[in-house]
């Protein structure tokens, strides 16, 4: 299993790191012995990992040398609207666009991916995704596994034909599971603890990960950063775009043995194996998982409530509407805390059809998941989240505060085939002073 390279800055100033990336087609060996044409950031599949530090700005100049238009979104990032990579803020073929990320949020495993209007599902599928690891002094001070024992795992599905062609097909017609760009790879580990940053970068499917021997592990972080305390699990479900950081202790295995990570949500027609860990050596292990990881901010006390209905038939919509970049669906004012109730209007899992959950993702903010069908969510979902799975028939409530950056943003299902077909809405965060005395707004400018 390869580990995506860390991108090197082209220059560094007192406040900022400057990076350059070129989006271009290249060939990758995803399945052993086959050459596959993919779309990349910087020539690798997945793209290189960007490392950022809280309080230091990251500037990425992206040049589009592909034949399709693109938009680069930092998923989970607290970013001004003009650098958010909105669906219509396109980088046309031949163009260059600069994105500035302030990194004024807590340490988290974020990712960057394509968001071009209507094209995001295919562009991400073809390779436009990469990890963005933000650290902060608190997180770095914890005795967690680090350095070569801190590894991102970018998991996704794909369909690769016998001649190597990457076929863009309907969801769940993708039997190849990839980790960091290789099909069902193996990874040589030492018999000690590892911090694994597990990403589901599949455009269209959720995975449920479990070790073949049922081994437990500790989840230490969710989408937006560290959990308050570690949570012991033996199965981890991630819908597309969700992340979880887990600490796995391989010292329970003998050197020379192996353990396989399985996807228990694989279809009957698919192989469930995702990744094999080969325990090849002993190693010192000064790391540990502290009992207390972080102090979470208080849950926003919502003063505005909104409802969102996520439908599947006849088409994937939010509140019956298809995304229109020219129509704000929600207007709020900077600093407002809100409670959003999101319902998957399918009453149950449709018989004979693949399991079709929706998910919900908002730009700009990390939210908190209050409850699912009225029951408080478990500790693994109680931290900072930017994407939440919503199964058929479920109702999920989330709370967030729209702070720091006024402007246009979007929220959407992160099943990217759904968002590409319009299961997305526009939210305008209005600056406080733009509110007229009669309550109407002057709208926003980017
Ligand atoms: Cu990961 Cu609006 O996206
Ligand atoms: Cu959906």
Image (cartoon, rainbow, N blue to C red):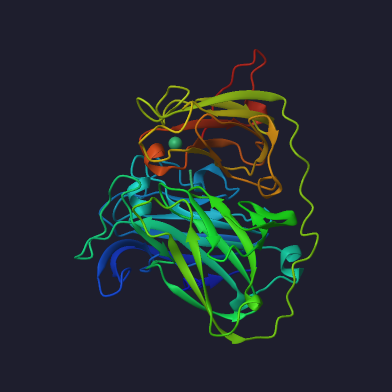
* Residue closest to the eye, 271 or 154: 271
Residue 39 vertical position relative to residue 237 in the rendered view, above or below: below
Whole-percent x, y for residue 115 in the image: 41, 46
Whole-percent x, y for residue 269 in the image: 33, 53
Residue 142 figure quarter = bottom right
* Residue closest to the eye, 313 or 387: 313
What residue do we see at 67% from left, 47% from top?
Answer: 384
Name the image quarter holding the N terminus: bottom left
Whole-percent x, y for residue 170 in the image: 30, 44
* Residue closest to the eye, 84 or 38: 38
Q: Is residue 427 left or right of residue 15?
A: left
* Residue closest to the eye, 21 or 34: 34
Label count reads 0
Whole-percent x, y for residue 355 in the image: 43, 40
Residue found at the far left of this picture: 163
Question: From this viewpoint, is residue 342 visible?
Answer: yes
What residue do we see at 76% from left, 63% from top?
Answer: 138
Residue found at the far top of this picture: 438
Question: From this viewpoint, is residue 104 visible?
Answer: no
Q: Is residue 2 left or right of residue 161?
A: right
Residue 362 vertical position relative to residue 233 in the rendered view, above or below: above
What residue do we see at 50% from left, 44% from top?
Answer: 82
Q: Is residue 100 left or right of residue 142?
A: left
């Amino acid at each position: 299993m390869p580990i995506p390279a860390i991108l090197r800055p082209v220059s560094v100033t007192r406040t900022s790191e400057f990076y350059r990336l070129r989006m271009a087609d290249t060939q990758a060996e995803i399945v052993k012995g086959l050459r596959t044409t993919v779309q990349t950031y910087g020539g690798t599949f997945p793209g290189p990992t960007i490392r950022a530090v809280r309080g230091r700005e990251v500037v990425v100049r992206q040049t589009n040398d592909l034949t399709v238009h693109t938009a680069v979104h930092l998923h989970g990032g607290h970013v001004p609207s003009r650098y958010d990579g909105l669906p219509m803020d396109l980088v046309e073929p031949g163009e260059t666009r600069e994105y500035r990320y302030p990194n004024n949020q807590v340490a988290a495993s974020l990712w960057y991916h394509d968001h071009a209007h209507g094209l995001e599902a295919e562009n991400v599928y073809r390779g436009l995704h990469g990890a963005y690891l933000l650290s902060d002094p608190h997180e770095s001070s914890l005795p967690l596994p680090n350095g070569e024992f801190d590894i991102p795992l970018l998991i996704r599905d794909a369909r690769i034909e016998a001649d190597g062609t990457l076929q863009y097909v309907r969801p769940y017609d993708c039997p190849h599971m990839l980790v960091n760009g290789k099909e069902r790879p193996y990874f040589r580990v030492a018999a000690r603890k590892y911090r694994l940053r597990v990403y589901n970068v599949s455009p269209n499917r959720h995975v449920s990960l479990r070790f073949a021997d049922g081994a437990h592990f500790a989840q230490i972080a969710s989408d937006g950063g560290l959990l308050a305390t570690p949570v012991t699990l033996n199965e981890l479900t991630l819908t597309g775009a969700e992340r979880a950081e887990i600490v796995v202790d391989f010292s329970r295995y003998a050197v020379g043995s192996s353990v396989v990570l399985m996807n228990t949500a694989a279809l009957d027609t698919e192989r469930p194996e995702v990744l094999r860990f080969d325990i090849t050596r002993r190693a010192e292990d000064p790391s540990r998982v502290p009992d207390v990881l972080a102090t979470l901010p208080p849950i926003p006390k919502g003063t505005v409530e909104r409802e969102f209905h996520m439908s599947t038939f006849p088409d994937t919509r939010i509140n019956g509407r298809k995304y229109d970049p020219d129509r704000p669906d929600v207007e709020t004012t900077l600093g407002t805390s809100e409670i959003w109730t999101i319902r998957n209007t399918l009453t149950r899992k449709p018989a004979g059809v693949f399991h079709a959950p929706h998910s919900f993702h908002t730009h700009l903010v990390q939210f908190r998941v209050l409850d699912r069908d009225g029951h408080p969510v478990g500790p693994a979902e109680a931290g900072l989240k930017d994407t939440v799975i919503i199964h058929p028939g479920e109702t999920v409530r989330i709370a967030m505060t729209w702070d720091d950056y006024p402007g246009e943003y979007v929220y959407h299902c992160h099943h990217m085939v759904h968002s590409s077909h319009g299961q997305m809405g526009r939210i305008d965060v209005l600056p406080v002073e733009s509110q007229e005395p009669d309550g109407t707004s002057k709208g926003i400018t980017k």
